[in-house]
Each structure stands twice: as C-alpha cells, then as structure tokens.
C-alpha cells in the first residue's frame, strides 16, 4: 500500500505463525502505509524479530522512535518474548495493560497477551484472536464470534469480557487428513467450493455430528463404488469438518442469536455458507480490518503515544 499524507502514531503489527502484517496508522486510525510477508514465527526466531520489524519499518520510512504494538505469536513462549495469558473472564479493553516490552528492540515495542481459559474441564488458549475480537466488537463486547482458521475459535463475550471460548482444530485436521490418511486418494487440490457437495456435507454433519469418522470414510467408499466424484471429495471433507464444528458451537447459542463471523477470503465464504445451512444469522467482519482496529483500540485505550510509551 502506498503511503498517504499524515503523521504515523503507531506501527500496528499482527505477527503470526506463518505471516507478518504491519500497518502505519495515525491517531484517527487511518492507514498510512502497510507491509506484509511470510516471515512468521520461525523466521523471527531465526533471523531476529527486531531485525525483521526494523527492515519493514525502514521500507516505509517510519520515524525513529515510532512505537509498535504487536499481537499474535510473537508474544508466545517461542516468540520474541512471552506475554503471559490473561485469564477469563478477560476484559478486552484492558488487554494492552498486560502487554510486555520486547527485549533488544530499537524502539518502544509492546507484545500483546493472549487469553487463557483455565477450567480443567475445558482448558483453552488464544493468542491474536483476542485483538480481532476487540476490533470487531469494541470495548462493550456482547455476543458470540466465530474466527475460522487452522485452529478455529468460537468466543462468548458479555459486558466487554471474553467469558468463554472453544478451539476447534478444523483447519489442521483438514490438512492432516488430506495428507496422511486414505482420503489423500479421494481429494483434488483446494479446499472445495461452497456448492452442493459442500452444503450436503454440512447438513449431514449437523444432523449427526457423532458420525463424523464414519462419514469421512464414506468419502472414499462413495468414490470406489461410483456413487461420488473425486472432484467433490475436498468439498465434502471440508463440509463435514466445518459442519461438525458448527454443530458443537450451535448448542451453546440462544435461539435467534447472531454469529459474528470474523473471516476473509475463501475460508470466510465457506463458513458463511455453512452457517447459513445451519440456519444461523451472520454478521460478517473482515478479519484484517478487525485485527488492525483492535490494535489501535488497545493502544488508545491506555493513552499511549509516541511521546509516552511507558507501560
């Protein structure tokens, strides 16, 4: 993105397992310039997080001393420095108060914490999604959100706090099943389209989520018996996995409750269609906009500026 006029107030950074995204924003939240790359967690650990960050900021001619607020896996135990989890119920507007300073940084750099659910019956963690929730809902968050991904999250919020959430390994299972099981012979490239085969699979999973493992083998068996096309294999696998995830999450929704879907691209389209098959109302929010807005809201909630960067 080409730089616009204006004075940067913050470098907002989303640093994930496999990706790096940076935005220069002014006090009003206007994006002045942006950079992105595939320099995720492993590259940061190998090359140096400060080195990568400064290279991107230098390419944007960011002023010396411009503070940066970073969310995502850079604040994990394997990242730049661990930003300890905040326990549920976690107030979204207060998360930046628990950010930690990055070591060896050449400017003020703060790493956002994640959120932990320490219920022994439902232990769970998130890191990065909390910032998207803040961006999508603001400080007065209420309702439920779905955040698709390799590890999809469903989060319940009340009075501005994340009170409960669940992680589904839907995306990771799709990849593992497609690579390492008998279904590797039943799939063509891609994750499938939200067409009839996908919708039928979502419906099957919603009707019988406990039958997932049998339905998965049915993808291969149907092709061997000439009852299904290999071109539909990926769509059916995707539909069964996403449908099973939604079946679990739907049990915790109030009648008529709207799901805020924080997503983008092809994966967002799949989830939007699957939620429609499930009869759920959806409020779509672009995932990139949500994380960027969340970083800015976290920063301004605690009054940090380029002149005052104390925690």
Image (spheres, rainbow, N blue to C red):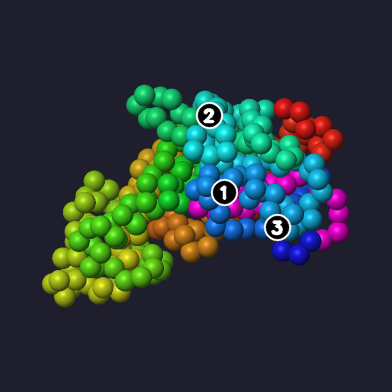
Question: Mark 1 or 2 closer to N-term?
Answer: 1
- Percent x, y for residue 126? 49, 37
- Mark in front: 1 vs 2: 1
Please identify the quadrant where the N terminus is shown. Answer: bottom right
Question: Mark 3 or 2 closer to N-term?
Answer: 3
Return the residue nearer the eye: 280 or 63. 63
Marks 3 and 2 sit apart, C-alpha to C-alpha, by: 28 Å
Classed neighbour count for the residue bearing mark 1: other residues with Cα under 10 Å, few (<14), some (14–19), many (≥20): few
The numbered mark at residue 34 is 3
Proximity of marks 3 and 1: CB atoms separated by less than 8 Å: no
Q: Which residue is labeled 1 in the image?
A: 47
- Percent x, y for residue 46? 52, 47
| Region of the chain picked out in magenta, as a range | 4-22
- Percent x, y for residue 130? 57, 39
Q: Give the residue at x 48% y 30%.
A: 116
Q: Which residue is labeled 2 in the image?
A: 85
Does residue 156 appear anywhere in the picture? no
**Position of 179 relative to 106 (above/below):** below
Marks 3 and 1 sit apart, C-alpha to C-alpha, by: 21 Å
Marks 1 and 2 sit apart, C-alpha to C-alpha, by: 26 Å
Q: Dividing the picture into quarters, in which one does residue 109 lie?
A: top right
Q: Give the residue at x 43% y 51%.
A: 150
Q: Indicate yes or no whether the magenta region holds residue 18.
A: yes
- Kind of element beneath mark 1: helix
Does residue 221 appear anywhere in the picture? yes
Q: Dividing the picture into quarters, in which one does residue 219 lie?
A: bottom left
């Amino acid at each position: 993105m080409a730089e616009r006029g204006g004075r940067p107030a913050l470098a907002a950074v989303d640093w994930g397992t496999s990706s790096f995204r940076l935005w220069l924003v002014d006090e009003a939240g206007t994006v002045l310039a942006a950079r992105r790359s595939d320099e995720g967690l492993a590259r940061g650990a190998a090359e140096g997080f400060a080195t990568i960050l400064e290279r991107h900021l230098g390419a944007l001619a960011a002023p010396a001393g411009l503070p940066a607020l970073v969310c995502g896996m850079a604040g994990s135990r394997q990242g730049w420095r661990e930003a300890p989890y905040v326990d549920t119920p976690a107030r979204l507007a207060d998360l930046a108060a628990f950010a930690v300073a990055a070591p060896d940084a050449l400017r003020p750099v703060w790493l956002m914490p994640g959120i932990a659910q320490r219920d022994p019956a439902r232990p769970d963690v998130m890191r990065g999604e909390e910032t998207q929730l803040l961006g999508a809902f603001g400080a007065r968050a209420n309702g439920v959100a779905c955040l698709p991904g390799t590890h999809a999250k469903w989060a319940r919020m009340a009075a501005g706090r994340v009170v409960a959430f669940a992680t589904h390994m839907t995306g990771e299972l799709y990849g593992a099943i497609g690579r390492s099981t008998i279904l590797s012979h039943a799939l063509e490239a891609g994750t499938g389209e939200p067409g009839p085969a996908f919708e039928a699979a979502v419906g099957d999973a919603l009707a019988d989520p406990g039958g997932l493992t049998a339905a998965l083998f049915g993808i291969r068996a149907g092709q061997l018996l000439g009852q299904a096309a290999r071109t539909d294999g990926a769509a059916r696998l995707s539909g069964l996995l996403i449908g099973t995830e939604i079946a679990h999450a739907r049990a915790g929704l109030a009648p008529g409750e709207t799901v805020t879907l924080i997503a983008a691209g092809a994966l967002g389209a799949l989830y939007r269609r699957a939620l429609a098959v499930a009869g759920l109302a959806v409020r779509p929010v672009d995932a990139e906009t949500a994380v960027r807005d969340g970083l800015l809201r976290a920063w301004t909630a605690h009054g940090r500026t380029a002149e005052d960067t104390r925690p």
